[in-house]
Amino acid sequence: MANDSIRVRYAPSPTGHLHIGNARTALFNYLFARHYKGKFIIRIEDTDTKRNVADGEKSQLDNLRWLGLDWDEGPDKPGDFGPYRQSERFEIYKPYIQQLLDEGKAYKSYRTEEELEADRDAQRARHEMPHYEYEYAGMTDEEREAKMVAAEAKGLKPVIRFHVPEHTTYAWDDMVKGKVSFDSDTIGGDFVIVKADGIPTYNFAVVLDDHLMKISHVFRGDDHVANTPKQLMIYEAFGWQPPKFGHMSLIISKDTGKKLSKRDETVLQFIEQYRKLGYLPDALLNFIILLGWSPVGEDEIYSLKQFVKMYDEKRLSKSPATFDKKKLEWINNQYVKSSDEDVVVDLALQQLIEAGNIPENPDTKTVEWARQLINLYKQQMSYMAQINEMADVFFHEPKEVTGDALAEISNDTAPVVLKEFAARVKKLPIFDKVKILATIKDIQKDTGIKGRQLWMPIRIAVTHEMHGPELPESIELVGRETTLEHVAQTLAQIDK
C-alpha cells in the first residue's frame, strides 16, 4: 500500500541541460519515494526568466526519462497540487505575501542597488561582513509611511523584504549532516522575498510550494544549507511544520580535488553529453547513485529496481563524493559487456554514422559488416564513441609503421612471415576468420616461426597496431585486398 504521507520533489530550473549533480538530486529523491512507496513529484522553478533557455524544461524531463526515472505528478502529469510550474503559481503566492505585509513580518524596501552597494563598501571599510541595514531604523510609523510615499513619487519600484528575527537560533536535524544550526544575526539581514518585478524569490516560493504540495522530505545539494535557515523563518512566520531536510555532500573532481564546477571543461558534466558519446543510461544511473551513497557489501553493479529495494537514506555520505571518470568508464564497460547485442550495435552504429565512417541509411551488407566490427570491440569499449578511434584502421589508411611497432618487426623472421602470409592469403578460396586462422597456423608449421614472432608482424602489418581484438576476425573485416596492400607496404618499408 502506498505511503501517501511521503512526498518528495525534484525542482529543476529550465536554465540549462540536466547536470550530473542535479541528476543525483533527482535520483536520491526518486529512490526515497519508491523505496517507501511514496510520491515523487517534478516541479519546474522557472521564475528566473532571464536565465531560462529554450527547451530547458523539455531537456530536463527527456534526460530524466532516459535515465529510467518516472514521476507521479509534474507539468506533464497534473495532479491535485498543481500547477507544477512556478511561473503559473503567482496568483497562489499573492495572498501569502499580503499576509506577511499585514502582519508586519515583511515590508516594502526602496533602497536602490547603488545605495545598497555604498552600504556594503562602507561595511567592508569597517571590516564588517556585508549585510542589509534596515532602512527605516528609528522611524515612527508616520515617518516610514512618508518615506515610502516619497519613494513611490520618484517612480522607485520596491522589493519586499522579510523581517529576520534578531538573536534567534534556527536548527534542524539534517538527514545527512546531523544537527545543524544558524544564528539569525549571521545571515545578512532582512532578505528579499519578492523582487521589484513582482516575482517571488527562490527562498520564499520554495517554502510555499513545498508546504502547499505537502512535501514531507527534501533531499538537495550541500550548497542549499545556507538557504535552509531563511526557509525555516518563512515556515515559522506562517506557523507551518517544515519538511525534513537532507543535504547531500558536494561532488569533487578526482583530478583536481575541487568542487565540480560547470566551468571545468575537463569533466563532462551534463547527461546530454554522455548520451551523445553513447553511454548506456543504466550504467550512468548506477555511477551517479554511487556518488555519495554506498550499498552494503562490495558489489557496485545494480539495476535501478535493486537500488530501490536496498535504498537506505542513512547510508548517504557526509564526506564529499569523488567524480572519477575512469570508474564511470569501468562501470559502463561492465554494462556494455553484458548488454544485448542489438542495443550495443544500434548505439555504436549511430556513432559510426555521425563520424562519417559509414553512410547514413547504410545497406544491409554494410550494417552486417558494422555489426561484426562492433562485436569485435564490444569487450573493450567503455562507451560507444570509442568505436571510431578503436576501429580507425578499418576506415583510414594507416601511416608508416613507427616506434615500438617498427622495432618489433625489424628482424630476420618478420619478412619471412609476411611474404608467406601474403602468398597464401591470395590463394584462399574463402577469406574469413576460420581460413585466416588456419593459414597462420600453417605458416607456423611450415616455417617453425611461432608465438610473438609469428603473430606480431601480421598484426602490425595489417593494422599498424601492436594490440587489438582477435586478429583473424580483424583481418577478415579489413578485407583481402586491403590486407594485401598493407602487407606489401610494410614489406617495402622493412626491406629497405
Image: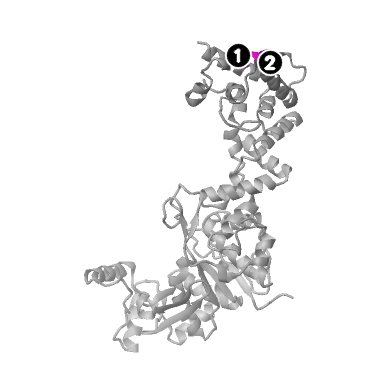
Position of residue 354 measured from the top left corner of the image (x, y, whole percent): 61, 36
Q: Which residue is mark 1?
A: 416
Q: Name the side, left or right, on which 337 lies relative to 53.
A: right
Q: Name the side, left or right, on which 330 lies relative to 127.
A: right
Residue lying at 48% horizontally and 49% vertically, measured from the top left: 267
Crowding near pointer 1: few (<14 within 10 Å), some, many (20+)? Answer: some
Residue lying at 74% horizontally and 24% vertically, measured from the top left: 432
Q: Which mark is residue 332?
A: none
Position of residue 99 measured from the top left corner of the image (x, y, whole percent): 50, 84
State the residue in front, 423 or 33. Answer: 423
Whole-Å distance between the Cαs marked 2 and 1? 11 Å
Is the N terminus in the top left, top right, bottom left or bottom right quadrant?
A: bottom right
Position of residue 220 measured from the top left corner of the image (x, y, whole percent): 52, 67
- Answer with the quarter of the image where residue 139 lies: bottom left
Amino acid type, residue under disc 1 in the picture: Val
Start-end of magenta stretch: 417-425
Residue 91 visible in this rendered orientation of the protein: no
Amino acid type, residue under disc 2 in the picture: Asp
State the residue in front, 217 or 79. Answer: 217
Give SS at disc 2: helix
Give SS at disc 1: helix
The first of marks 2 and 1 along the sequence is: 1
